[in-house]
Image (cartoon, coloured by chain):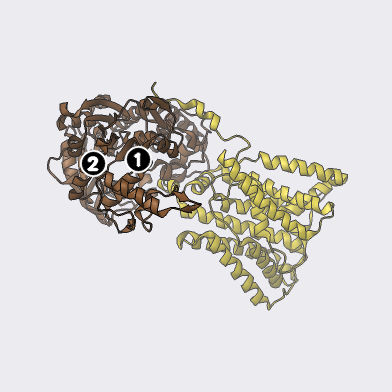
Amino acid sequence: MTVEAPTGPATLGQSRRGRWGAGSILPVVAILVLLLIAVGIRQPDFYDPPALLAFLKRSAPLIILAAGQYFVIVAGDFDLSVGSLVTAEVVIAARLIDGDPSATWPVVALVLAFGLLVGLVNGLVTTLLLVPSFITTLGMYLILVGAVYTWTGGSPRGALSEEFRMLGRRGIEGVPWLGEIPYAVLILLVLAGLAILAMRSDFGKVLLAVGDNPRAARLAGGRVAGVRTIAFVVSGGCAAVAAILLGGFGGVSFQVGAGLEFTAITAVVLGGVVLGGGRGSVVGAMLGALTLQTLLTLLNLLGVAGALASAVQGLIILAAVAIGGLRART
Amino acid sequence: MHGVGKSFYGVSVLSNVDIDVHPGEVHAVVGENGAGKSTLMKIASGVYQPDSGTLRIAGESVVLHNPRDAQAAGVGIIHQEFNLLPERTVAENVFLGREPTRRGLVDRRAMRARTAELLTAVGAETVRPTDRVGALGVAQQQVVEIVKALSLDARVLIMDEPTAALADHEVELLYALVRRLQARGIGILYVSHRLAEVFDLSSRITVLKDGRRVVTVDTADATPEALVRHMVGRELASYYPPKADAPGTALVTLAGAGNGRLRPIDLELRAGEVLGVGGLQGSGRSALARALFGVEGFTAGRMTLDGRPVRPRSPRQAVRAGIAYVTEDRKGEGLALSQSVLDNALLASRAATPRWFGGGARTTSVRDLLAAVEVHAAGADQEVRYLSGGNQQKVVLARWLAMKPRVLLFDEPTRGIDVGAKAAIHELIRDLADQGAAVLMISSELPELLGMSDRIVVMRDGALAGELPGDASEEAVLSLATGTPHEVPA
């Protein structure tokens, strides 16, 4: 008997990773549907359009942060600085505006620019100085926290103008049936659309390849350092937008961004994106954020203490990564 | 062993091999690197399980699931790399994991006595059971390995390149030991590429080539020349596509070009020509291709492309200048394995010449290219990791064809690829040259190098050792590569 090498391995299709495999969005969609049903049972008026839009408005910052974090994670990196960046942005905005409405738009522009700049620094330190992004962004996290505390002397000063807070709080009013369309939801839709387009573009495909195998991407003529740096800039920009929205929701405090980097990473992983890069979609990451927000809402409705929510998050990230690893193996 | 076959990831490395060993016989197995010797030995010692064929020991059919099964069945193996604990004594090593016990305690005295007995049996009284293994010489450590195998009542002993690590005077001791083992009725499978010792020791010789048994001969009837002919073999050479009629004009020229790993090199790559690059591993062949492609670029000398000076400082610049590079490490740096066939084929287009619009037409043309090079996949959206080596290489080729490169650098283009796909890739390479591209092809496989190249340069120690015509002999390439005139290629 002779063993011949298969020449036309069309049969290898069997080993093709299924639609439920690592990187797929179907699992998160399934979880989201289940959670939405559960919330609906607990609180039937959840599905009234205004209530649903209000829920989306609350979810918008996390979804935007998750989209930004996705770009970094799928390229094989982490961005741990986004939580403290959000805090820093809100605190800076409050101090610079100090209740003066005329300062609103210049400060919004400044907040966006600062977010992009922090992302650029993260990216350049990671790619040019070859510092692992885990360390780069952890360092940036501490720098931002320390700098903001020092600058404000320990407690936030100043106040955001009503115009600034409008972006996170208000919306287009008087829309028939829907009621009010929050600006936050509009901003979210625009950014989500841009993120999806970016991932369908050549840039997005190269970003995936970089996360999968940076050496192959380089040998194919890709600018690996450039692409990774852009991912950090996107993440910083998203954090800035999230900060603007969150500043509108709540008050000015050092707590506004606390832990958000971890929540965003949990959301991304829940969305089926594989840590280490190269697999998963930005839609999955954003759905992951929505799912996490729905879960937190449900826990709230069930009267679970807020403190437990972080434990649940921890469990989710461990489970999602472990299950992702198992799925990747089969 | 009868009709033994084995393939890895769809690449057949051993097919339909028969081999037998009689008690008290030394049966030598010879062949070039990659001929399948190691795989055959690993099957015989239970490391691998054959896909086909049977093993019989003393007439009984056996299935060896693991090396432990092989030991129990009386098959011992002496690897090139020893498997000993240097801080333990000889006796402790011999009985590692199965120490004789008395009342629950290790019976050191019995262990030493038994070891001494075996050492005497093989005529190695100079080694004492109480010696620390780390203090022994290489030859003596080998003796310990052999004694270890004998203590397991081995009836068949596989010796894989046993003289590779030995000094000349130690080889004589090994010969004596092998003859003693023979006298004890142990059958020995002796793997070596040193023909001299094969003729000294063996009674029969089996030649493997490309995973097949070419011939088994009685040593008395064989000559070294005939064996070399069998080992090198030329059956496949006729499958190479016809060579270029006339060399074209110089497309790439190097004048004194070098870097940290390459001494100054003068070289021409001509349009329409396949330039073969031979040489040993580490001779600078890959460094040359990588320098041309800007991975680790030239730091000295001049490089021109089409008469204009260029010096790619990154692969991106090289790609944009019309150069393509097919790496020897397909999985490590050629493919993004979790991405689809289509995305991998589009990678160079997207990475080196990104666009915001008009991607659709490019996608269509790359799909056509994938079909043209006959990639067999479940679909263009299948993850490329599930393709066979040959199909993966075709995906890489399609990626570069999409860039319409004028210079193509191939580093071991058919490594790990089965014979059928190999011929297809050879034809694609020749087509590219016929269409006017300048092709540089690095190959360790001499038949491929000679069969494909219109002209050959051989590298040694980071420099060009010499240039040969496309119809040169393997001996000529080898002697340039090793720097020793006329050596038997083995």
Outermost left residue: B485
Query: Color used for chain A?
Result: yellow
* Residue B323 visible in the displayed image: no
Q: Which mark is residue B278?
A: 2
Circle 2: residue type: Gly
Q: Which mark is residue B77?
A: 1
* Whole-percent x, y for residue A309 in the image: 75, 56
**Can you say which quadrant of the picture contains the C terminus of chain B?**
top left
Residue found 20% across the figure and 50% down from its top: B167
* Whole-percent x, y for residue B452 in the image: 25, 32
Q: Earlier in the sequence, mark 2 or mark 1?
A: 1
Nearest to the observer: residue B423 or residue A154: B423
Above/below status of B42 relative to A301 = above
Q: Secondary structure at mark 2?
A: strand
* Whole-percent x, y for residue B151 in the image: 36, 43
How dense is the environment of label 2, judged by Cα within 10 Å: few (below 14), some, or many (20 and up)? Answer: many
Name the chain letter of the residue that bears numbered label 2: B
Above/below status of B156 relative to B101 = above
Q: How many marks?
A: 2
Circle 1: residue type: Ile
**Eye-nearest disc, 2 or 1:** 1
Nearest to the observer: residue B371 or residue A308: A308
Q: Mark 2 to mark 1: distance in Å?
A: 34 Å
Q: Which mark is residue B322?
A: none
How dense is the environment of label 1, judged by Cα within 10 Å: few (below 14), some, or many (20 and up)? Answer: many
Name the chain letter of the residue that bears numbered label 1: B
Q: Secondary structure at mark 1?
A: strand
